[in-house]
Amino acid sequence: RVEPSAGCVSAEAARLIADAARRQGNGHIDLTSRANLQVRGLSPRSAQAFAETIIGAGLASANPSLEAARNIMASPLGPDDPSAAFDSHAVARDIEAMLAGEPALRALPSKFGILVDAGGALPLADNTADIMVHAGEGGLAVHLDGGARAALCAPSSLAETVKALALAFLRLLAERSDKPRRMRALVMAVGEEAIFAEAGLTTTQASPGLTPEGKSSIGLIPLADQ
């Protein structure tokens, strides 16, 4: 799988991935529910050649543990959506940079994910992840899967807030014999307040305005330059 940074693929990168998929696999590419590109028909040998091409183009990390931790799903239009509450691509890249700079987070379970939903024309309100970022009152709201509260923060401190929660997850996980692998399971086991407290964060009750309802993507979608 190829996990595009902030869910963005340039035309040049798309052509490179398509060419590598055709040369090393059977040319079939699936778009997964988590906005990854899944390349089909690779053999053990061609998979290595495909990985070298993708890494060489800067589309993936050569460190497998870092690449495994980089599970971020963001609103697809980013700065091009004038109706979005914030630039989801910029926030996602800040989180990616934080993950790259914090080796301890490479111990997160392989499916542990982060969602960045800026609302707007193509919101991600129907999707969930272990840690979720939405527009909040005067800033950003960070939620836990399975919880009903949120930590409010400024965009400049968002990556550190996410890091604090992810590290809190790992510390609380280490204390338990049952070893829950997802945030929802840990919330059920210890309560969301215990996780926020472990992260050193105060919370507020999440209001309906922090979690916008999904909208249909059918029809005209205006962009920032139109």
Image (spheres, rainbow, N blue to C red):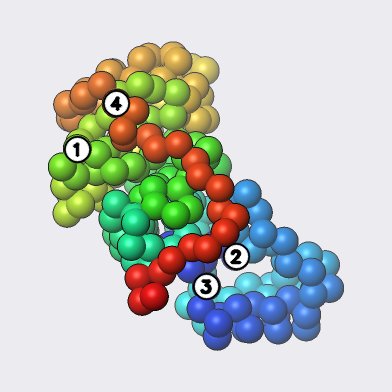
Q: Residue at x 78, y 65 (%)?
A: 40
Q: Say what amino acid the circle numbered 2 marks.
A: Val
Q: Secondary structure at mark 2?
A: loop
Query: 115 and 201: which one is in front?
Result: 115
Q: Earlier in the sequence, mark 1 or mark 2?
A: 2
Q: Earlier in the sequence, mark 2 or mark 4?
A: 2
Residue contact at pointers 2 and 4, CB within 8 angstroms: no
Query: Which class describes the residues within 10 Å of circle 3: few (<14), some (14-19), or many (20+)?
Result: some
Residue depicted at 44% across the width and 23% down the height: 146
Q: Height in image: 132 above or below 183? A: below
Under circle 4, the secondary element is loop
Q: Identify which amino acid the numbered label 1 is placed on.
A: Glu
Which amino acid type is marked by label 3? Val
The residue lying toward the viewer, choosing from 162 and 215, is 215
SS type, badge 1: loop
Which numbered disc, 2 or 3, marks the residue that appears first in the sequence? 2
Q: Is residue 97 left or right of residue 26?
A: left
Label 2 belongs to which residue?
2
Give the CA separation, mark 4 to mark 3: 33 Å
Task: Of the two numbered discs 4 and 3 on the same chain, state the one appearing first in sequence.
Answer: 3
For badge 4, the amino acid type reads: Ala
Residue position for label 1: 137
Q: Quadrant of the C terminus?
A: bottom left
Q: Earlier in the sequence, mark 1 or mark 4?
A: 1
Q: Local crowd at mark 2 within 10 Å, few (<14), some, or many (≥20)?
A: some
Res 206 label:
4
Give the residue number, with chain letter if any, for mark 3: 9
